[in-house]
Image (cartoon, grey):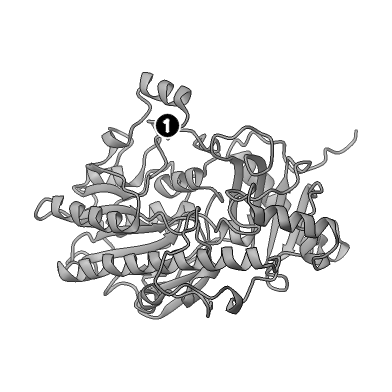
Amino acid sequence: MTRLLSIAASLAMLAPGYAAAGPPNVLVVLSDDHSAAHVGCYGNKDVRTPNLDKFAAAGMRFDRAYVACPQCVPSRACLMTGRSPVAIDMTRFSAALPADVVTYPEVLKQGGYFTGVAGRTYHLDGPGANVPEAAEVLAKHGLRTFPKRLDFVKTAAGGDRCVAQFREFLDAVPAGKPFFLQLCFNDPHRPLDANAIPTPHDPEKLALPRHFPDTKLVREDFARYYDEIARMDGHFGEVLAELDKRKLAGDTLVIFSGDNGAAQWRGKGTLYEFGIRVPLLVRWPGQVKAGTSTAEIISGEDLAPTLLEAAGATPPKEMTGKSYLKLLRGQEFAGRKFAFAERGAHGSGLPTSSAAFDLSRCVVGKSHKFIYNATWQLPYQPVDFGNSDMWKEVRQLADAGKLPAEVAKCYDGKPRPMFELYDLDKDPAELTNLAGKAEAAAVEKELRAALVEWMTLQRDFLPLPVTPARP
């Protein structure tokens, strides 16, 4: 295939100091619906993540890692391809990844890697039996492509089964071959189990984020979310222990990341920080200095070119991500100025609420974020818990004026502004919209222009966030 580059042909051009060791094994571990704020090493004193914290201490923590979409399918498509969901026609949640869009594991496979995906569904072969009409079309036209792209393609539900499947994959790796695996956990995706861990988090002792309503139901739900993170942390520890047991840890580049943000208040399905800023931790013995962190802006697009360069391959020219391999190695690194994200349809729901359907875009800069809500008339409704008693109660409290004003306005059922601008340094909870304010005019102009350029280059189908000049 002319679009796939052979690693074998480029191994001779490995970065200085790495050629003697050969290409690393690559393990990418994804949690599901997990914001950066919900890991101990990011400063959270309530959630129990000892294995992730220890892992972070052995490598590099990324403090400003943004996914390309606050939803599973488009975000994972970006991670796999190094391209935005807009550019590869993956903004519709139930789409299958086009066959002509190359994934980085395919490039690795062409160069001699044994490649696979395991655990929770990888989300990129379209909907299953729950949407029979779509499933029939996918089967009729042969649009499910991943079994042809990789060597090992399996799914499993539940953390124990994910770990078992990880062991099964390692058993299948041919002797002498490097491997790549994306291992996906279900946790902490909803529904949230009541007995996820033996000693649950105490709802009354949790520090709620500033934008959260403070009710009994909210606290109980948030505690269960933390319980599922803790359960996933335990399974992640088992994965690391298996690498140690097989004496693979020293030769394996391990990345841990959330696929998108938490299905919590102003999280999953939104372009706020809880929706698109995720944990990103990297351990690579002998290459990444232990105990380091970075505030460089990283996009989900950047994972693919980074891992290809780490393996000695040149990323395909179609990839728009920016490799951060130099950053990992502590070398001089010219980072990103902006990261971009999009929001489209969710699941297979009809366009009856912002949970099932929304069209928005955002750009994140060094200190501010600009959000463009093209479907601003749709009031906010949370993804995955919009029919819960918890959500209904909060709406009633907002209507009755029984919530703090800054919180109530987030959930009052009114149309959203078309444009939002937040100072992430001074207002990390994103509660004070600066769009249209004179004091923020310069930064708004800069970010709006950056978003216009990105949307134009991506051939975005949305109208640009500008008002045409009158003749």
Residue 140 drawn above or below residue 1: above
> Can you see residue 435?
no
Q: Residues within 10 Å of mark 1 (few under 14, many from 20)?
A: some
Observer-nearest of 173 and 11: 173
Residue 276 drawn above or below residue 59: above
Observer-nearest of 250 and 39: 39
Using residue 424 as the reference point, say whether residue 249 is left or right of it: left
Observer-nearest of 221 and 244: 221
Name the image quarter holding the N terminus: top left
Q: Position of residue 418 (x, y in %)?
A: 78, 47
Residue sticking out furthest to the right? 471
The residue under the point 39% across, 52% down is: 304
Count of labels in the image: 1
Residue sticking out furthest to the left? 175
Instruction: Locate residue 251: give its quadrant.
Output: bottom left
The residue under the point 64% across, 63% down is: 217
Instruction: Locate residue 126: give its quadrant.
Output: top left
Q: Position of residue 100 (x, y in %)?
A: 38, 31
The residue under the point 69% across, 40% down is: 353
Name the image quarter holding the C terminus: top right
Q: Position of residue 238 (x, y in %)?
A: 27, 67
The residue under the point 45% across, 25% down is: 132
Element on which disc 1 rests: loop
Per the image, the residue denoted by label 1 is 98
Residue 394 drawn above or below residue 46: above
Using residue 244 as the reference point, say whether residue 227 is left or right of it: right
Using residue 189 as the reference point, say whether residue 337 is left or right of it: right
Q: Position of residue 286 (x, y in %)?
A: 26, 75
Q: Amino acid at mark 1?
A: Pro
